[in-house]
Amino acid sequence: MSVPAAEGAPPIELPEIGTTVFLAMGEGLNLRSKLQAVEGGALIVTAPLETTGLTVFEPGREFEIFWAPPRTRVLLPCRLTAVSDSPPRWTLVPAGGARHDNRREFIRGGAGAAVRLDAEVNGQPAEGALLDISEGGLRCWIDQPTTLSQGDRVSATVLLNTAEVRVSGVVHAVRPAPHGDPGQHLVLRFDAKEDVARMIRRYVFAWEIDEYRWVESSES
């Protein structure tokens, strides 16, 4: 199935069902999702965990989604028209023409590593568990309330397999953990130097291979 392209270009093919797609929410925040179905021109995707309980993601919100076929990236403006909780799904309707864009995007992955957060000015250090990481940021779970807040400059130390990575960035958001879980989720944005970015890419690549093997074994 295809969707109309921007500026009269030929239609662009939608990704296959089950493909990972990303929801571009602005301010560098890309939420990972998966295409579940296409029904009457609407795209049904899994609801990202980060948005649970947040009213800002109610029907009517517009944003872009993107996916990454070989050698390019496709962006499609969409409008959120329906939200369901069981199962957690979003219904998206195209709000404009799709277009190709070759701008680099960071792929996130990984989970479980210990994270230490140290405020560069004020605030107490915090210990957390990594939820995912990319060259441009990380998301972690903190089981105790933190004094860190949006806009704070923070240094984070993460053990990625056997390599310790230290980055410095700005807190993008601190939110309650979804699904009634205790603690908070903290999102940190940073600009990794090339040697650190290379270690993060290797870690995420190895994690994705392990995830693929786990899915393959569970479905066999």
Image: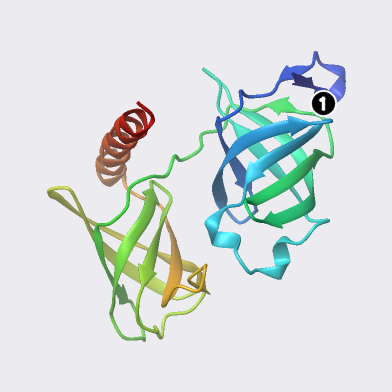
Residue drawn at point x = 45 percent, y = 69 percent: 185
Q: Position of residue 141 (x, y in %)?
A: 38, 68
Q: Outermost residue, top direction?
A: 10
> In front: 155, or 220?
220
Q: Nearer the viewer, residue 11 or 54?
A: 54
Residue count near mark 1 (Cα–Cα under 10 Å), binned few <14, some 14–19, many ≥20? some
Q: What residue is shown with label 1?
A: 6
Tell me if residue 170 comes above or below residue 119 in the rendering.
Answer: above
Q: Quadrant of residue 69?
A: top right
Residue at image coords 42%, 77%: 182
Which x, y percent locates residue 55? 71, 69
Q: Quadrant of the C terminus?
A: top left
Image position of 199 (left or right of 123): left
Is 153 on the left or on the right of 202, as rendered?
right
Residue pictured at 71% horizontal, 61% vertical: 57
Q: Quadrant of the N terminus?
A: top right
- Above or below, 202 against 151 in this view is above
Q: Looking at the image, which is closer to me, 169 or 129?
A: 129
Looking at the image, which residue sits at the far left?
162
Instruction: Name the colour scheme.
Output: rainbow
> Which residue corresponds to the image point at 30% horizontal and 64% vertical from the top-left?
129
Q: Is residue 61 left or right of residue 159?
A: right
- Amino acid at circle 1: Ala
Residue 23 in percent (x, y) is at: 62, 45
Residue closest to the far front:
220
Q: Position of residue 72 (x, y in %)?
A: 57, 22
Secondary structure of residue under mark 1: helix
Tally of numbered discs: 1
